[in-house]
Image (tube, grey):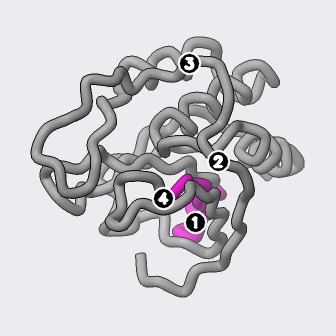
Amino acid sequence: MSLDIYVGKCVRREANHTQHWILILAKPGEDKCTWYHVRGGHQVDPPEQYHLDIEDGKRLASRGIQQRIKVGSIKESDRNKVKAACQSVPLQRCQTHTVAVLAKLEAKGLVQAGIAAQFNTQVEPQKVAGSKSSSSKSGTVKSGGSMSSGTKASGSSRRS
């Protein structure tokens, strides 16, 4: 049995917010999937610590996902390698975290080389909740420390 790996680009909640990105694992032909994504930071008001959410049983065809891009397929036995990659990357903005996870998956041979670089070119400049303009900081992934630590795995009951 295999699992497809997608990057999901979510519907913007507000025009002045950066787009939320999630990593998705799904069995081909099934609507239920697992979402891996970072929440928090300055994108929410009031700002909060970043945390990793791992949510099983989510809808692949969620109305909250504007675009879903397939980046590869893995053996189901490699599922924990994806989870480990997500948990090993320092917590940061969702877009840069997703790119860093893709780079780890590339290094493990789970996605095609060049995928992380392709998505890195699409990272948006950081925007702060309540601001009308973007920060002058680049949004691309750089090596270095994390902005916070810790992970949170949840089986969220929110509707998707």
**Which image quarter: residue 97?**
top right
Q: Sequence-wise, which precedes: disc 3 or disc 2?
A: 3
| Marking on residue 30 | 1
Residue on which disc 3 sits: 142
Q: Amino acid at mark 3?
A: Lys
Q: Is residue 106 above or below residue 67?
A: above
Q: Which mark is residue 85?
A: none
Q: Residues within 10 Å of mark 2 (few under 14, many from 20)?
A: few
Q: Give the SS element for disc 1.
A: loop
Q: Neighbour class for label 4 at 10 Å: few (<14), some, many (≥20)? A: some
Q: Quadrant of the C terminus?
A: bottom left
State the CA–CA distance, disc 2 to disc 4.
10 Å
Depth check, mark 3 against mark 2: the one in front is: 2
Q: Is residue 118 above or below residue 52?
A: above
The answer to whether residue 27 is left or right of residue 69 is right
Callout 1, which amino acid? Glu
Observer-side mark, 1 or 4, equals: 4
